Image: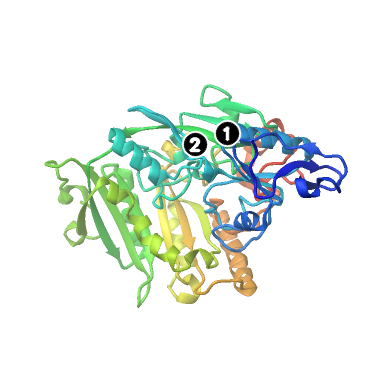
Amino acid sequence: MLAVTAAVIGFDIVAGRWITHGTAAAQSPFDDVPELDGKLFLDNGARAGMSTDRGQIVTRMPAAVLRPGSATDIQKMIRFCCRRGIPVSARGDGHATHGQSLTDGLAIETRSLTAIHEMSDDHVVVDPGIFWGDLAVATYNARRRTPPVIPTITKLTVGGTLSVGGAGANVHFGLQTDNVLELDVVDGTGTLRTCSATQNRDLFEAVLGGLGQFGVIVRATIPLIPAPTRVREWRFNYLSTADHVADTRLFTLRGELDEVHSEWLPGSTGPVRLVTVAKYFEPGAEPDGGHYLRGGTIPGLLAIQEDYDWLPYLLRSDALVDPLVNLGYDQLLKPWFDVMLPDSVAAEFIAAEFPEWAPEIMGLGVMDLKTVRRSRVSNPMFRLPAPDGSDLYHTLSVLRTSLRPGPDPAYVEYWLTRNRQMYERARALGAVRYPADSQDFTTADWAAEYGDRWPELVARKRRYDPESILGIGVDMFAGA
């Protein structure tokens, strides 16, 4: 039976509000809410908890919050909302920064669904709300297996990153969206559909990286590969952005290392430019840095080398972030900027836009560069930068963070304006947006990014979400 803080029993289609036992007598006739395995909340605490995201910039209070007890709950409630024109958004960890997962209708809190339903040596079937780190720990401990691509910050949900793209440091496997065998999706009509590369392929392609516009992922089948026992990591510190990006390119294209990760960290006299590379190995077969680091602009002998066991290595970033969260990091404003740059212009763009490092520019933030091989990106509906003859492109994430908790409207307005200016300059160089950041995007902007694929995307939206109730926080198809 439905169990709620204030029991919700229906929806008044005349007044446009949810009905509880306490208000039913005073209301006109209403439609009954379906019986659920989970809970539907109307209280201010539950609603406020789903009213903003990691950015702390956009606030949108949902009318109700669903903590589903099953995928069937999501199916029932989307069907219910579709008939009444109630907007719906699903949210995992709320890692986006500009209201992408927010709604003033029904918010689905997928973190209540974290089960692992099936595991073998070559795949795992999971709920959308499980964190990638928890999944990787479970597959490693049970079978010494791992998903091919795991985000650097592992406290992100499977459903969340598959809805955006999901880049990791591994250079061999593309994006997380390229490493999915099958999805169960509830579309905007409340229909549960299984989709894959061979079944309902148009929905499969649209949902992966589709920002919640076509359906809610309620189950995912992820491939598994053998996990290493040990990892050897080398770190280089660069004086110039040109050398920094050049070595990132070299180590990725050569394909001998397993991970390449570039970042800019705060330093007392300017940015600390790091390239971190890693090679997986088994005890007794330790990798030779002289071989793997050859040809870089900095001699391999100058690299800082460390060895790790696999799981501590995998979870190392969370060990750094968790103390910040405990100190109030989640309450800081985060007008982040994410863009996918063609290989040929990445160093030029970064050097021009960030010639120096100052607290007033980055606050407590860092910059991050993830390099992906185009040939590993398999979804034809995923937007990529303009081709430039290189097999690489780079996702630049400017994780700018305020020094003090908000609100600060002037700070937000300044950085939203600057983000847009940077985006326009990047777009002129062939870049596209990675849409977890803070920007005001219009339907015309989306249409320009998708180019000749846009009409087909609109057709899929009409097919799978005919009432346009899904993903209003992104507002991709307004007027389309």
Residue matched to label 1: 71
Quarter of the image with the N terminus in it: top right
The answer to whether residue 461 is seen in the rendering is no
Nearest the eye: 111 or 268: 111
Element on which disc 2 rests: loop
Do callouts 2 and 1 mark residues in contact (Cβ within 8 Å)?
Answer: yes
Q: Where's residue 22, x and y in %?
A: 77, 49
Residue matched to label 2: 127
Q: Residue at x 42, y 37 (%)?
A: 375
The answer to whether residue 377 is seen in the rendering is yes
Within 10 Å of disc 1 (Cα), the crowding (few <14, some 14-19, many 20+) is: many
Quarter of the image with the C terminus in it: top right
- Residue 466 occupies quadrant: top right
- Residue 147 occupies quadrant: top left
Q: Residue at x 46, y 75 (%)?
A: 359
Residue at the left extreme, as displayed: 284
Q: Amino acid at mark 1?
A: Ala
Q: Residue at x 61, y 51 (%)?
A: 100
Q: Amino acid at mark 2?
A: Asp
Q: Where's residue 387, x and y in %?
A: 49, 44
Mark 2 and mark 1 lie on one chain; the one further toward the N terminus is 1
